[in-house]
Image: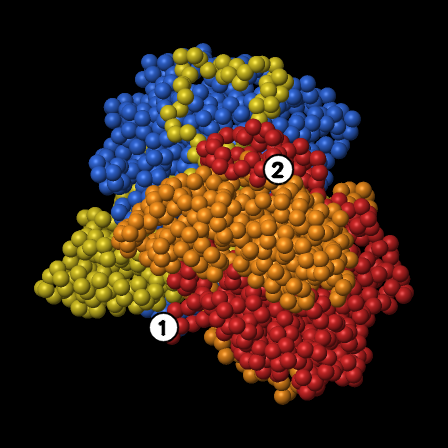
Chain colours: A blue, B red, C orange, D yellow
Amino acid sequence: MGVVGERLQPTLFERSHPGRGGGKIPHPPADALARIPEAARRATPPALPELNEPEVVRHYVNLSQLNYAVDTGFYPLGSCTMKYNPKIDEWAARLPGFAGLHPMAPDAVAQGTLELLFELEAILAEISGMDAVTLQPAAGAHGELTGILMVRAYHRDRGDTERTEVLVPDSSHGTNPATATMAGFRTITIPSAADGGVDVDAFRAALGPRTAAIMITNPSTLGLFESRIGELLEATHVAGALAYMDGANLNAILGRFRPGQAGFDVMHINTHKTFSTPHGGGGPGAGPVGVRAHLVPYLPSPRVVREDDGTFRLERDGERPASIGRVRSFTGSIGVLVRAYAYLRAHGASGLAEVSDDAVLAANYLRARLRDAYRIPFDRACKHEFVASASEIRQRTGVRTLDIAKRLIDKGFHPPTIYFPLTVEEGMLIEPTETESLETLDAFADALIEIAGEAASDPAVVTSAPHEAPVRRLDEATAARQPNLRWRGMTGAQTPCPD
Amino acid sequence: MGVVGERLQPTLFERSHPGRGGGKIPHPPADALARIPEAARRATPPALPELNEPEVVRHYVNLSQLNYAVDTGFYPLGSCTMKYNPKIDEWAARLPGFAGLHPMAPDAVAQGTLELLFELEAILAEISGMDAVTLQPAAGAHGELTGILMVRAYHRDRGDTERTEVLVPDSSHGTNPATATMAGFRTITIPSAADGGVDVDAFRAALGPRTAAIMITNPSTLGLFESRIGELLEATHVAGALAYMDGANLNAILGRFRPGQAGFDVMHINTHKTFSTPHGGGGPGAGPVGVRAHLVPYLPSPRVVREDDGTFRLERDGERPASIGRVRSFTGSIGVLVRAYAYLRAHGASGLAEVSDDAVLAANYLRARLRDAYRIPFDRACKHEFVASASEIRQRTGVRTLDIAKRLIDKGFHPPTIYFPLTVEEGMLIEPTETESLETLDAFADALIEIAGEAASDPAVVTSAPHEAPVRRLDEATAARQPNLRWRGMTGAQTPCPD
Amino acid sequence: MPYGPHTADDRARMLARIGIDAVDRLFDDIPADLRSGPLRLDPPEPELELTARLVALAGRNRVDLASFLGAGAYRHWTPPVVDQLLLRGEWYTAYTPYQPEVSQGTLQSIYEYQSLLAELTGLDVVSASHYDGGAATAEAALMTCRATRRERLLVSRAVHPHYRETLATYARGAGLTVEEIPLVPDGDAAGTTDLDALGRLLGDAERPVAGVVAAQPNVLGLLEEMPAIGAAAHAAGALFVAVVEPVSLAVLAPPGEYGADIAAGEGQPLGIPLQYGGPYLGIVACTEPLIRQIPGRLVGMTTDLDGKRAFVMTMRAREQDIRREKAASNICTNQALLALAASIYLAAIGPHGLRDVAASGAARATELEAALAAAGAPRIHAGAYLNELVVRVPDAGAVHARLLERGVLAGIPTAHLLPGEPGLEDGLLVCATEVTTTADIERFAGALRDELGASSTNGTAQSPVAGAA
Amino acid sequence: MPYGPHTADDRARMLARIGIDAVDRLFDDIPADLRSGPLRLDPPEPELELTARLVALAGRNRVDLASFLGAGAYRHWTPPVVDQLLLRGEWYTAYTPYQPEVSQGTLQSIYEYQSLLAELTGLDVVSASHYDGGAATAEAALMTCRATRRERLLVSRAVHPHYRETLATYARGAGLTVEEIPLVPDGDAAGTTDLDALGRLLGDAERPVAGVVAAQPNVLGLLEEMPAIGAAAHAAGALFVAVVEPVSLAVLAPPGEYGADIAAGEGQPLGIPLQYGGPYLGIVACTEPLIRQIPGRLVGMTTDLDGKRAFVMTMRAREQDIRREKAASNICTNQALLALAASIYLAAIGPHGLRDVAASGAARATELEAALAAAGAPRIHAGAYLNELVVRVPDAGAVHARLLERGVLAGIPTAHLLPGEPGLEDGLLVCATEVTTTADIERFAGALRDELGASSTNGTAQSPVAGAA
Ligand SMILES: Cc1ncc(COP(=O)(O)O)c(C=O)c1O
Ligand SMILES: Cc1ncc(COP(=O)(O)O)c(C=O)c1O
């Protein structure tokens, strides 16, 4: 009921009432389906919920109020870049010319979108320092798969078929090793050095003729720039492997470091992080992939081509035979890319540089503010995020990072990413982003410091948190042991169709 | 912070930070204002708040969550018809063709809107049983003024200048007498009879050669149909006066009673009630006025005219010389009227009849359910709303209607209208509307019955309510004694303009 | 019914509880001879078909023209954030905040609106909103009568004609007299309120004046000598009502500074779509001493029982629901959502942005003036203007119609706007804002040049000329 | 930076606290030789100008044509309530619900989505979403390999070519073999999966098949013998993947009923705008025994410490963030907001509405078939179809291009869709849905009649003919 009353909501199914709803679509002729053979028809209508529009609205309005969101408060979820999503981008994606265009429309009908995509590729190529970009992948992990499949095709085309391994640092995001597996590679995990960077010796030891690629997240998931990246890249190339950069953390280095220019062969970009397309409660995103010239032949098809007369078209089937093929249906998550394009245009060169400067400044400011209350495992200049650890607090008080995270909820903040990367004990990865004000950063630091105090003075208040949220901690064990993944017991929409 | 944290929000001014914002409008040339004389220029820039867009969004998203609304729950505010506002209507009003049309656009440019208005007039004329309708008035009270000014013009044109009084029942809405005053009339208040209707004898006694008009709300603000309306109308007309119907309660009688056909001379309609255009936290609305033939010459100008060739135009200046003139700038609250039109089309004849049937059914159902716990002063078939009274509860327990209203908040409901009409002691005017489900009606009745129980068993919990809202009861006395109606203390946006 | 919840079964249960057998019984109190038959309207239209109908209707309006229309409603660019926030059901499906405990959102937003407009106007008391600029001006004029207990109003003829007509309608109802202050016919001050005439009108001691109403900028786009008008009014014991355009207040002196007692105006330019005239936002602001005369709602800051800051409707004894026939006005439903739109717009665009909007309009208007003059349509007036101006075009009405066929909405013929006003027979009132593009201006000037070349060769003046013919 | 909060002063305060003098210091860890110069991009564009740019670009797409395009993406009418609810920041600016206590909105909505799709597909386990129909199909195929520990996949050639190509790309990566099941070339079953050929392919005991993938309706709009395909697959120890279109499931038998182990498909028809291809909604559903193989997120119902019902992500051990290289898939970011759109669409349109949508498409398609046949373009196939069909048009590619000039988007030349497929050289795949109007159909048929009349007089058949040439 919003501002007052019970906040948790019944399910759509509990709200259902046979005979409700209707009035939206004219009824087709009664014999509309007569020509469909009985055997192919559905015997029992699906038992979908029947609601009238007012109930639908209340359901989703009230449910939405149970969510924490960037639009309601500070969301310093490390590695996820939860920054402000400009509203003009939402408007742009909904322009009928963009939103209503059919993906199988002939090129002549799609010139506006094709031009936008072509321009966007160029902008991303400039930012990434790459020679070409594909906009097809639907997310970061999808971009990784696309990139690693190109690596595979590259080696295979050169007859280099013994390269079956991908080196991945232990601090990397889970998508990296999972991608390697999906692309048919074996993952070799490289430990981190004491300074948080890749252990270069271990790396050199693992590198060899079986190495197809290295996947480096830079800045790393610890928020640290790999300062020995030059060495790593050189060794990789000397070994005949390719260097993949996980660009999920590009937000930190816009205009400061262009991976392609620096020697990476291929990288993906998360538009839903760096270019602020909204995360949507878990998606959608887009994961454009940039490549250097030697990988261009392998880019997925179709790409956008500009003709001499200034018109645009999609590549035709088979036009680039070395392509790894499609990684999805149609051309890409265009609605997401329209938003990214608008964001990029609004910022321009100077704005993008400021994005990174301010993101990095904010992270370092928080690091400085939290230094006394929390252990900062790598207490040097971080990039857009940094890891703090409650390991000492835990030793002293028994209060764990999980508890601190839950207690932050009581204080009105979304918790940071916790226990990631897995390499840091009781870690929390804090990413403030560039769109949060100093007042907000201070309030958050104050809250975390206060909680550190509570852990000492009144640990129970922390370990039993949250107290103010719509629900308390959940029974995840039962959820996994006896999974209830769908509603049962609707009796089916067998009521006569209402008018 | 939405789902958790402090719910009350700082003001825009407290959120302001000099130097924030910008990036939306290109800067004009520095000399853009050079040709404006110094004397006409503003010396100090206005001290408006400076926020970046993320802060603006959080401000208004979080503030909005402090509101109870139809979209979040049951809002049985009597006399206000807080029913569901269909979302297609919001969509329609935002179509660029409607939203972007300039009010001084020539007729040729405005054919779509003019056609819609013309059709809407016809639909409302049919519903009201009137001969013609003006769509100009911006709200119900504005419609009243328009109608009563037409009455005035009518009498004056007939040389009937001694008619200086307007008869208004004591249960009427405050806008009725206030309107009479604005139109230069004296208000004569007519008491109610024991059955809640107009006291016909008192009415006859007051009626006379000085009576310009009677203003009858039908169904009345007690939710009762004036069943002696035939008598009242006849007496009015015999006395040479005109009969105005306050149509705010039209929701109850669609397709059952057409006021013009029944003998009323003029009435207004609240689109924001009967035809579900949203109330917007207090507005906007629209108050179309229907008249019988003898008042058509006085309708405000301009009206929409249909030419023989099927095109539409606005009346030209002076085309209908007896018109009372304009009651506002431009043509009307068109955006509101587009919504009403969509609503009317979606419902059609049968849907509108169902609206009233179901609204009346719901009100009578609630009346039946509450009969044992509350006094129902007029316990007969009501229309779309009814009055319940806590007078007996107050006598027994000291708990007042105000307390009960506040306690309803704790139970997740918006309170009904209380202490209105003023004629009922400890009254609450309950209007459930036709869009609320039986489950909701039952939950509301249960809550009210429970509160009646609490009043007896634990009156303090009721008199100190609400307990669950973002704020407790307010200090209205100080607010009125030492009015603080604006923020002070912003130091002014004298910072250099940010880029 | 498309949005209703009730099935036949639900209805049966309700009837049973009520103890009747048919809904018809609930209408037995309508006298049989007064009952109506079924409505003669179309059947319900499913939303899918309704969509097509509405799209077709909207498509019959032409909003793709190069438009130079102003005169009280202005094309502006509104950041999309404004409408996206307005579309939240918590805002637009709430009612008047009668229950403050569950309406702090609306209440705080109104308080903020009052504060923002107080700052823009330089006047401390701002009502929560009125119907529109015309109604606001009328209510402001009525305020002066209540406050001075006088019954005569003077209105500059350069106040928007719709506002003057609305004021006349309201005044007629209230039994008040309205007289118009003529405009200076020629010379440097041509087109502005005639101060001498004002002096004469105020000088009639028999018929003391309650209020003087003038607009800044006026309906011809010209800047008035507001301090002088105010001083004259005050010298005669009258109150001074300034009709203002809120975006201009980013750069023009605020009414509170030049002695206005009341400001009235149209808030549409603050982020509200044109919509062929409404819903718009009537602004009324006044000085503290007039606080008990102001019509409409006021929201004040206060505390709750726990001492928490909170907001509430206040000074309600002026309002119709309390005072009935003695109320300051009959206004009830107002334009709260539009006031919210204006606040969000101001918050989103910021003070510098607002200044840029106003100054861009001025810059575009300068460009427009030059282009039209070069095309043979010089400015008519000599006085200063902000972003609207009148140019002379021989046979203005006909040229206007022909330009429309060429996709140019060439402003408004002044002969329609101020019929009979000397010197304006051949004028077009044109307007530029920050959304006016150079391409639009060139299109206008080019088309105009063609038309003027085609229609006559007896050359019109090629450079601006002050004063009327 | 347009949306940033920091002033020079703020930055100075932050630097001071960090103890450095310039932001540049924070980038000292980037080796000097690898630092980049300033980006060679345009300067920031104020939103006002960006608005104009975007409107111009969008205007260069043509969305005003009479369109008969389908083939995997479908024009439908979506109740406006869907997008208005999606635009709430609480939905679209949240992230993956890692903290369930402050994410019950998203979690419950995913649980509801899973339940709705389980009901539509007749399969109990539904993932929280995949990238799109193509990726979902590929993931479903990979599941069959993991579950059977086999490495050979059979895909009907009547599965959308993009899906087949995506599957091929994924399979190549994973080292799997994909073979296509040919289509029946002629006769009553022309255009559907060749069951005999399928039998032969499954019969190869040396190379056991993990999964058989077929689509219902297939990409030519035809209805397949799904039970027979499933039975054949199962007989060979393979799993059966049905590629489905969710709106059709209102009227067609659900995969769970005809023996599919997995359903995959594109959720776009459930209220998601066309957007030139995305973001869309990949659907994957499976039977309970396959639960540990399903990739992507799952949300389950549970309780909190107080016993209150609540929702949480569950069975996470399949996912990359926990399992890393052993995960069921690398998927992380998915299409949650689109799953929400689909749920709201289903809730708003209801079961009867969904049936009406599906049946209206069928009715419109019948109308279209008749009109095109009368215009000289008879249907090519004899089999049953729902709302997409292939008609024969001599020189289809050229006619298609000429119709485009006349404002008709005449579907898709089948020669492009399934190059080399016998009998489809001269076909157009056309589609009708509830938004197809009679006027559009007449426009198409009229233009086609003109074109066919103009281009040749050697009469094509005037009545439907079964089978391929
Ligand atoms: C470092 C890193 N790499 C890869 C990814 C995967 O990106 P996506 O979630 O878009 O698939 C993420 C996402 O959180 C990430 O943080
Ligand atoms: C009976 C009645 N009359 C008149 C009005 C005034 O209508 P409005 O608020 O639109 O001015 C109302 C509004 O609540 C009302 O209930």
Q: Which residue is mark 2?
A: B46
Question: Residue B108 lies in what quarter of the image?
Answer: bottom left
The front one of C48 and B160 is B160
User: Picture quarter containing residue B432?
Assistant: bottom right
Please tell me whether residue A67 is drawn above or below residue B96 in the rendered image.
above
**Residue extending farthest left:** D458
Q: Residue B309, labelled with which disc?
A: 1
Residue appearing at x 40%, y 40% in the figure: C367
Q: How many marks overall?
A: 2
| Residue A305 left/right relative to D230 | left
Residue B89 appears in the figure: yes
Lateral position of residue A458 relative to residue D345, left or right:
right
Q: Amino acid at mark 1?
A: Asp
Pick whichever of labels 2 and 1 is earlier in the sequence.
Answer: 2
Q: Is residue C406 above or below residue A174?
A: below
**Type of the residue with mark 2:** Pro
Residue A309 picture location, percent across and down? 22, 38
Residue at 36% over, 35% down = A120
